[in-house]
Image (spheres, rainbow, N blue to C red):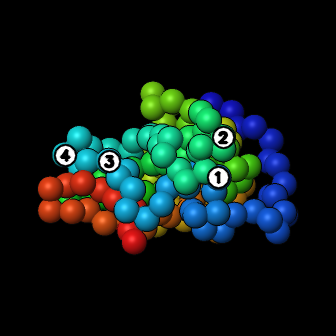
Amino acid sequence: MTSPPSLPLPQDPAEPRHWHQIAHAPAPGAVLGQRNTLPDGSATLHELASGSDTASAPGAVFRYLLLRSGSGVLAFVNRCAHFGVPLAARQDLLQFVPHKRITCNVHYAHYRWSDGLCTSGDCEGESLLPIPVVVEADGTVRVAS
Ligand code: FES
């Protein structure tokens, strides 16, 4: 495998720094998934069409990742810190090492599983945007209030 040439880091100060700054972000309390549908060690792609502004933008979706480790579930916006594009457009293209890392399939930046920090690649030192979640007793994963 060959890597594409290195590209400059985006310098736009308007780059989002928090998940709720992303277009079509869901409201606190929104359901993101069910833990019992996520195999341990899985990283899965999801979309939500129930963001607060989808009425003004029909068809718009919010893309995110769910990572399961044991009883815990982490959520991140599916948006590479390098160019602001999805890490993968389809589930079968998502590259990850269970409980260890996720890899962007555009320029192969590596993100640490536990906190989304980019540990190598063109956006090293930046992070995926974490979404705070709560996992309820029945396994429902919701955006934290
Ligand atoms: S878009 Fe370049 S590493 Fe993800």
Q: What residue type is labelled 1?
A: Ala
Tell me if I can see residue 78 in this picture.
Answer: no
Marks 2 and 3: CB-CB under 8 Å?
A: no
Label 2: state its secondary structure.
loop
3D distance between C-alphas at marks 2 and 3:
23 Å
* Tag of residue 33: 3
Labels 2 and 4: the sequence-earlier one = 4
Marks 1 and 2: CB-CB under 8 Å?
A: yes
Labels 4 and 1: the sequence-earlier one = 1
Q: What residue type is labelled 2?
A: Ala
Label 3: state its secondary structure.
strand
Quarter of the figure with the C terminus: bottom left
Instruction: Please tell me whether residue 135 is drawn above or below residue 49 in the rendered image.
Output: below
| Along the line of sight, the residue nearer the viewer: 26 or 14 | 26
Select label 2 or label 3 by which is in front.
2
| Along the line of sight, the residue nearer the viewer: 145 or 127 | 145
3D distance between C-alphas at marks 4 and 1:
28 Å
Labels 2 and 3: the sequence-earlier one = 3
* Tag of residue 79: none
* Tag of residue 57: 2
Q: Is 69 left, or right, of 60 in this rendering?
A: left
3D distance between C-alphas at marks 3 and 4:
9 Å
Label 4: state its secondary structure.
helix
Q: Which residue is drawn at 45% across and 53% down?
A: 101
Marks 3 and 4: CB-CB under 8 Å?
A: no
Labels 1 and 3: the sequence-earlier one = 1
Quarter of the figure with the N terminus: top right
- Label 1 crowd (10 A; few <14 / some 14-19 / many >=20): some
* Tag of residue 36: 4
Labels 1 and 2: the sequence-earlier one = 1
Expressed as whole percent of the image width and height from the top left, the position of residue 52 reads: 55, 54
